[in-house]
């Protein structure tokens, strides 16, 4: 951004466990915390695995076998199993402890989208830029397009920074499924999330 002589109004990253979002967003958090600038940091997740947007902030295991230490995180429950969407890297039941705390303190925002809208934005990006993005990265791309359209509607100029974290050349079957109408949106039902959360470990503090 320094090379571009600009500064982002909004920073966007896809979010499963949190590494992509942290890599692109955390460098700007110091400015936000210090009060020097106030960029929005946006975590984008699948509607079928809405860890931040529908999960709870609680102690949980990091794996279904319950072998890892418990951490306080936003979680859908360690035995949560989402639908088999094509963004496999975004199907983790929890978020990192650091990212979860920042989200809990409202230093980050969360958004969730269905995979049909995400793949449509991915193809728009591929036709515009000549780069075929991974389904995971395409969540960030879709959120960036939503932000850009909103800015146009509001008559505002915004610097939007997003993380293109991977190519989609190993995901051509997913693109073929999308183009031929074989993909479906999955919004995980609240009842299933609530059932998984009931099985969270009991922690005495």
Image (cartoon, helix red, strand yellow):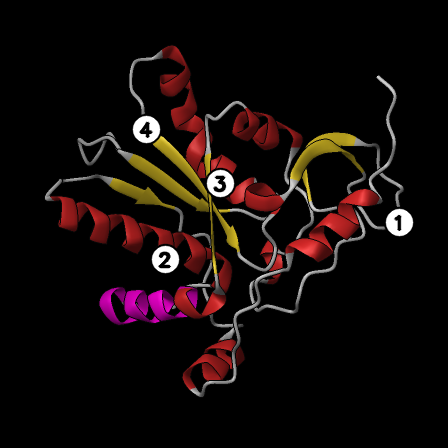
Task: Quickly name the residue at label 2.
Answer: 142
Residues at discs 3 and 4 in contact (Cβ within 8 Å): no
Residue at 58%, 50% in the rendered image: 50
The answer to whether residue 104 is above or below residue 125 is: above
Name which of mark 4 and mark 2 comes first in the sequence.
Answer: 4
| Residue 129 image offset from top left, x and y in percent | 26, 64
- Spatial CA distance of label 2 from label 3 is 15 Å
Residues at discs 1 and 3 in contact (Cβ within 8 Å): no
Residue at 46%, 52% in the rendered image: 165
Name which of mark 2 and mark 3 comes first in the sequence.
Answer: 3
Question: Which label is found at residue 39?
Answer: 4
Name which of mark 3 and mark 4 comes first in the sequence.
Answer: 3
Q: Secondary structure at mark 1?
A: loop
The residue lying furthest to the bottom in this view is: 180
**Label 2: few (<14), some (14–19) or many (≥20) C-alpha neighbours in 10 Å:** many
Task: Quickly name the residue at label 3.
Answer: 21
Nearer to the camera, 129 or 112: 112
Quadrant hosting residue 205: top right
Task: Quickly name the residue at label 1.
Answer: 65
Residue at 29%, 68% in the rendered image: 124
Q: Is residue 116 magenta?
A: no
| Residue 192 image offset from top left, x and y in percent | 72, 57
| Residue 107 image offset from top left, x and y in percent | 46, 25
- Spatial CA distance of label 2 from label 1 is 34 Å
Residues at discs 4 and 1 in contact (Cβ within 8 Å): no
Residue at 42%, 23% in the rendered image: 29
């Amino acid at each position: 951004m320094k090379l571009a002589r600009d500064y982002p109004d909004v920073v966007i990253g896809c979010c499963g466990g949190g590494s992509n979002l942290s890599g692109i967003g955390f460098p700007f958090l110091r400015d936000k915390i210090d009060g020097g600038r106030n960029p929005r940091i946006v975590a984008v997740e699948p509607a079928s695995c809405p860890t931040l947007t529908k999960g709870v902030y609680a102690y949980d295991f990091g794996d279904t076998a319950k072998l890892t230490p418990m951490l306080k995180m936003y979680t859908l429950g360690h035995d949560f199993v989402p639908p088999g969407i094509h963004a496999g890297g975004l199907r983790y039941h929890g978020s990192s402890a650091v990212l979860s705390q920042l989200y809990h303190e409202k230093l980050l925002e969360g958004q969730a989208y269905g995979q049909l809208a995400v793949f449509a934005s991915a193809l728009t990006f591929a036709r515009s830029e000549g780069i075929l993005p991974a389904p995971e990265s395409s969540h960030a791309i879709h959120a960036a397009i939503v932000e850009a359209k909103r800015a146009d509607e509001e008559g505002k100029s915004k610097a939007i920074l997003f993380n293109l974290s991977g190519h989609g050349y190993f995901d051509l079957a997913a693109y073929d499924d999308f183009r031929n109408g074989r993909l479906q949106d999955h919004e995980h039902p609240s009842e299933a999330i609530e059932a998984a959360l009931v099985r969270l470990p009991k922690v005495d503090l």
